[in-house]
Image (tube, rainbow, N blue to C red):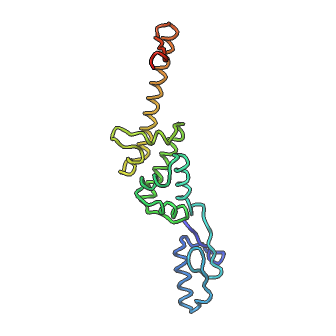
Amino acid sequence: MSTMKFIETRTVKKASQAAILAGCVVAGTGGISIAHASGVGYGLPGVHYVASAADNYVGEQLSAITSSLRTTNAELARALGVSRQALYNWRAGQRPGSATIDRLERLSSAAKVISASGIIPKHALARVNSDGQNFWQAVAQGADAVDLANKIVDNHNARESQRKLVAARLAAKRSRGTLPTFDVDHLE
């Protein structure tokens, strides 16, 4: 949330409140010549915009999601049902609607689940699930990103356990000499 510091002593919680206050003072006093343009609209001398840490929280989330899930803006935009330009606007400081913010929070949580597992996300998220969709397609259809991420991790762990079991069985057969060897040149 943006804050405005009013004449160094009064803090206004939203930039819109400060703009309305400045507009009332300017219009009501006929002092339009003393108003100046700022990054948040028109203001008065002595009204200073103070950026808070939460000003570009959405942009930081987008960057975290794209870097940890190794995705493109186009793929992320499709999953959210928005344009790539909307993503660029959000990175620049515009705020999306509350439903989109909720979806971004879920994607951010999913990114943490995937990153903590050590899975290479690009391949895991592209893998088609039992519904015939990959991660991004399922998210675009409204599936919960965190549930999907947990399923991906569970499936990955199950496949990894199976690989280790097969490798151990093959090693045991090799040590007993019961594993047949194939002449690769003969197969050509």
Q: Is residue 49 left or right of residue 150?
A: right
Percent x, y for residue 30? 56, 92
- 57 up-or-down from 155: above or below: below
- 97 up-or-down from 142: above or below: below
Q: Name which residue lies at 51% across and 64% down.
A: 89
Residue lying at the far left in this picture: please name it: 131
Percent x, y for residue 175? 52, 9
Q: How many marks?
A: 0
The answer to which of 71 and 110 lies nearer the viewer is 71
Q: Name which residue lies at 56% across and 86% down.
A: 25
Residue lying at the far bottom in this picture: please name it: 30
Percent x, y for residue 54? 57, 61
Q: Name which residue lies at 42% across and 54% down.
A: 78
Q: Is residue 114 left or right of residue 128?
A: right
The image quadrant where one finds the N terminus is bottom right
The answer to which of 14 and 188 lies nearer the viewer is 188
Quarter of the image holding residue 127?
top left
Quarter of the image holding residue 162?
top left
Percent x, y for residue 178? 46, 8
Q: Name which residue lies at 65% across and 80% down.
A: 46
The image quadrant where one finds the C terminus is top left
The answer to which of 152 and 175 lies nearer the viewer is 175
Quarter of the image holding residue 59?
bottom right
